Amino acid sequence: MAKKVLIDTDPGIDDTMAILTAFNSPELEIVGLTTVFGNSVIENCTANALRLVELARRPDVPVASGAGRPMVVDAELIAAPVHGEDGMGNTHLPAPQGQPVGMSAAEFIVKTVLENPGEITLAPLGPLTNIALALMLEPKIAGLVKEVVLMGGAATVPGNISPVAEANIFHDAHAAERVFGADWPVVMVGLDVTTRVMMTPAFFDSIFKADTPYTRLLQKMLPVYQGFHHDFYGMNGSVHTHDPSTITYLLRPDFFQTEEWPVHVETSGRCAGFTIADRARQWGDRRPARVCVGVDAVAELGLLHERLTRY
Amino acid sequence: MRKFWIDTDTASDDAVAILMALRWPDVDVVGISTVSGNVPVEMCAVNARYTVELCGKDTPVYLGAAKPLLREASYAYFFHGPDGMGGMNYPAPRRPLAEGHAVQALIDAVRAHPGEITLVTLGPLTNVALALALAPDLAQKIPVCYVMGGAAATLGNVTPAAEFNIWVDPEAAKMVFHSGLRLVMVGWELCRGEANLSEADMAEVRGFGTVLADFSLDCNRQAIETNRTWLKDPALPLPDPVTMAVALDPSVSVRQSSHYVDVEILSEVTRGMTVVDERGVLNRAANVEVCWEIDIPKWKETLYRTLR
C-alpha cells in the first residue's frame, strides 16, 4: 500500500524537484500540498504549488494555503536571490487554473491527520510554521501522525543562512522548537546530508535528455539556483540536494545513516535557528529525533535520476 | 445590538465579567472561547457554562487552547481556588460544550459578521494569536479588541515585571500586539487600590439580595484573601470586570493614548513585560491604545447595574 504523504512546502526550485519526484513515485500517495512562506512570499508559493499539481496532471490533489509569516518574530528574509522573484527561478509561468481549498494549511493538516489516524507522513520542506500551528490547534495529532520527515537543520555541520542556522529552521525558529519538542517521531533531513549530495551539471544534462514537461521546467528554473550556489559556494553549476533528499528518505530510508538525538532549537539572538543535538541527554528527556548524519549519495542520485526522468 | 465575543480563562473574576456582558442591555454575546490560564481549559469551560446558565442564557461556550504556544501551562489556583471559583464547588452545568475548536469558531463568527464583533480577552492570548495566524484577515474584520492584560509602565503581579495573562503566553501576546488588530489594553493596575471593591462596596453589593450579586462575591472569596496577603491591596480586585466595563461603556476609561507597545519574550526576569514606549523614543507606529485611568465610581456603577 502506498504511503500517505502530506507535503508542506514553499516552492521553491528544490521543492519543485522534490514534489515532482514524489508524484513520480508510486510508493507514495500525495494527499495534499500545504504551503508556507519561505523561498518566496506565500502568494507565490501557493500559486507555484497549484502549478505543480497541474503540471503533474494531478489537479485533484488539494492545495491549502498557509502561513505568510513566522509565528512570533518578523523575519523579513525571503530567499529571492536563491529561488528567483517568483520562487520558480524567474520562469514566470502562466497563472494556475485551480484554487486553494477553503481552509488554512494548519486546519487542513489537522483534518487530514484526524481522518487518517496513524497513516499520514508529514513532509515539511519549508519553515515549520504550519506544522506548529496544527499542533497547537489540535495537540492530539502528535499521537496520530505516522512520522514527520522534515528538511531542515544542521546538527553536525555549519548552517547556510547563518554560520549556525539552516534557512527553514531560521525562518521560524519558534515553530521549529515546538515541532522538535513535541512527542512524535521526527526525522531530520538536514544539511548534514543534503550538502553531501551534489547534483552536478552532468547529472542535469543527463536528466534533460528525457525532454519531458518536467525536465523542461527544471531546465528553465535551474540557472538561478545554480547561480546562487556558484556565487555563494563556488560550485561551478552543481547544487546541493535539499528538499529532494526528504522524498528520498520517504522512499529509501536505508540510504541514510541516522542517530537518535534530542534536538533543541535556539529561538533568539545571533544563533537563532541553531539546531542543537543533545547527544548526551544533558537537557532533559525530550523525545529524540532521528537525525540523518550520513547518506549514500550515489544511490540517492541514481534514484532521483530515475524518478525525475519519468513522465 | 452590539455583538461581543469573549475569550476567557474562566475563573472567578472572569465569571463576573461574563455575566456583566450577558446582562448588558444593548450587547449580544455571540460566543465564548475558553483558554488555558487561571485554571486548565476544561475547568474554564465548566465555569463559563455555569455562569452562562446562571444568567439564563444559552451562549455557546467553546473549548480552546490547552496550553500556551511554546511554554508550559501555568495556573493561578492560589488566587482563584481549586475550582477557579473560590472553592464554592458549584454544580456542573447542564448544557454541553459547543462543537468545534474555539479558534475555528472565533474565525467563523468574525468572517460571518465582518466589522461587527467586538472582542474582549480576559486570559492569555493563545487563542487569539492562533486565530490571527490562521486567518490574518481577522485583524481588519474585528473593529476593536479590549485586552485585560499587561501593566502599563508599572509593576506586575505574577512577577515584579509582568501581569499574569501576558506572562503565561508572552509569544502569543507579542503576536497579537503586532498583528494590526486594534487593541485597547486595560492593565491589571486599573483594578487596584480605590478600584478594589472595598468592604463597604461589597456590603452594598450583598445588599442587592440577588443571586448574581451573591455569586460575584462568593466565587471571589479566595481572591479577596490572596489579594490582601499577597499583593497588600485593600479588598477585592476585579481586573476582568474592569476591562469589561470599559468595553461595555468606553467612557469608563477617562485617560487613554496610543503607543508602540512590545512584549518581552527573551528574558526570564522580565518575561511578559509590556513595554510601553510612552515618549515615542523608538519612533515606531503606535499599535496599542493604553488605558491609563478609569472613572472609578462609573466602573463600579457599571458593575452594579448588572448585579441588581
Image: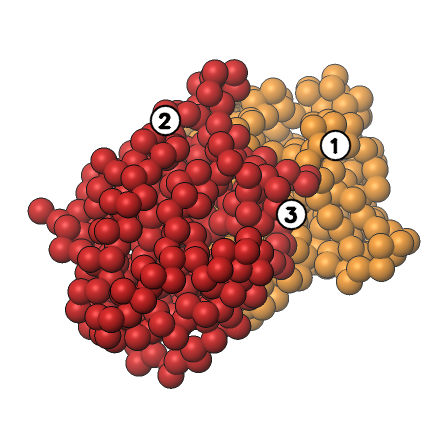
Inspect the image, locate mark 3, and give the three-letter code of the amino acid beneath it.
Lys
Q: Which residue is mark 1?
A: B270
Asked if both marks, 1 and 2, belong to the same chain, the answer given is no
- Colour chosen for chain A: red
Element at label 3: helix
**Measured Cα–Cα span from mark 2 to mark 3:** 36 Å
Q: From the image, which quarter does the C terminus of chain A lie in?
A: bottom left
Residue drawn at point x = 78 percent, y = 62 percent: B285
Mark closer to the chain start, 1 or 3: 3
Kindly tell me whether residue B37 is visible in this rendering.
no
Residue type (three-letter) at the residue carrying disc 1: Thr
Seen from the viewer's position, the closer of residues B236 and A238 is A238
Callout 1 and callout 3 share a chain: yes
Please, is residue B61 above or below residue B155 in the view?
below
Q: Label 2 belongs to which residue?
A: A259
Q: Which residue is identified by label 3?
A: B174
CA–CA distance in space, label 1 to label 3: 14 Å
A124 or B180: nearer the viewer: A124
**Image mark 1: chain:** B
Where residue A206 sits, quadrant-wise, is bottom left
Distance of label 1 from label 2 (alpha carbons) = 37 Å
Q: Which hue is chain B drawn in? A: orange
From the viewer's perspective, tell me whether residue A28 is left or right of residue A128: left
Q: Is residue A300 above or below residue B78?
A: below
Q: Chain of mark 2?
A: A
The front one of A46 and B165 is A46
Q: Residues within 10 Å of mark 2 (few under 14, many from 20)?
A: some
Looking at the image, how many numbered discs can be counted on the residues? 3
| Residue closest to the eye, B302 or A148 | A148
| Kind of residue sitting beneath label 2 | Glu
Q: Position of residue B153 (x, y in %)?
A: 84, 42
Left/right placement of residue B171 relative to residue A294 reads right
